[in-house]
Image (spheres, rainbow, N blue to C red):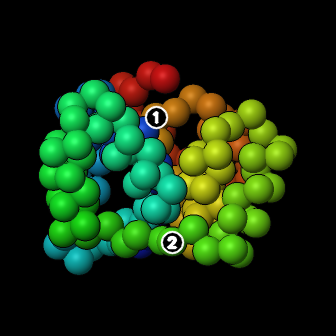
Amino acid sequence: MRVNTLVLDSFAILAFLRGEPGGDAVKTWLQRAQAGRGRLALSTINLGEVLYIVERRHGLARAAQVLAFLQAGPLALYEATLPRVLAAAHPKARFPIALADAFAAALAQELGAPLLTGDLKFKALEGTLTIYRLTGASS
């Protein structure tokens, strides 16, 4: 199956940034998108999650570098508009997932795109959206 758009969650971005298992797959998708062979989407809520984790572990300067890198790259950022907040409320209410994960799931549903993650908590959403699991990742 050919995928034109792929939604990334915080787990995928962090795996790439940390060089963790599954990070190479994210790098490949970033390179494909940079070359115009696909689109990558990220909720600004997931962006915020990535940034607070980076800042907590590595400081504000590193978080600012990550933000600049992500903004300059091929990721399309999707704002948390009221319709998206309402859409994210549904998976959060129905499944045992974090709020940021609910935004990633809702964005994948909105775009009709698969979600790339290594987070095992998304297993509960199988059947409601297509999930591409990062190989070698464990959560």
Q: Looking at numbered disc 1 in the image, what kind of residue is underneath it?
A: Gly
Element assignment for label 1: loop
Q: Is residue 60 left or right of residue 51?
A: left
Identity of the residue drawn at 51% across and 71% down:
79
- Residue that carries the numbered disc 2 in the rendered image: 79
Q: Quadrant of residue 55?
A: top left
Q: 10 Å neighbourhood of mark 2: few (<14), some, or many (≥20)?
A: few
Asked if one can make out residue 118 in the rendered structure from this viewpoint, the answer is yes
Residue 97 percent across, percent down from the top left: 68, 37
Q: 10 Å neighbourhood of mark 1: few (<14), some, or many (≥20)?
A: many
Q: Is residue 75 left or right of residue 120?
A: left
Identity of the residue drawn at 32% across and 31% down:
56
Residue lying farthest right? 94
- Residue that carries the numbered disc 1 in the rendered image: 118
Q: Is residue 44 left or right of residue 39?
A: right
Residue 54 percent across, percent down from the top left: 29, 37
Q: Quadrant of residue 124?
A: top right
Identity of the residue drawn at 37% across and 66% down:
40
Task: Answer above or below: position of 9 versus 40.
Answer: above
Task: Answer above or below: position of 97 versus 6.
Answer: above
Q: Looking at numbered disc 2 in the image, what kind of residue is underneath it?
A: Glu
Distance from disc 1 to disc 2, alpha carbons, whole Å, reads 23 Å
Tag 1 and tag 2, C-beta contact below 8 Å:
no
Residue 21 percent across, percent down from the top left: 29, 28
Task: Answer above or below: position of 28 versus 54.
Answer: below
Asked if one can make out residue 7 in the rendered structure from this viewpoint, the answer is no
Residue 14 percent across, percent down from the top left: 33, 39
The disc label shown at residue 101, or none: none
Q: Nearer the viewer, residue 70 or 61?
A: 61
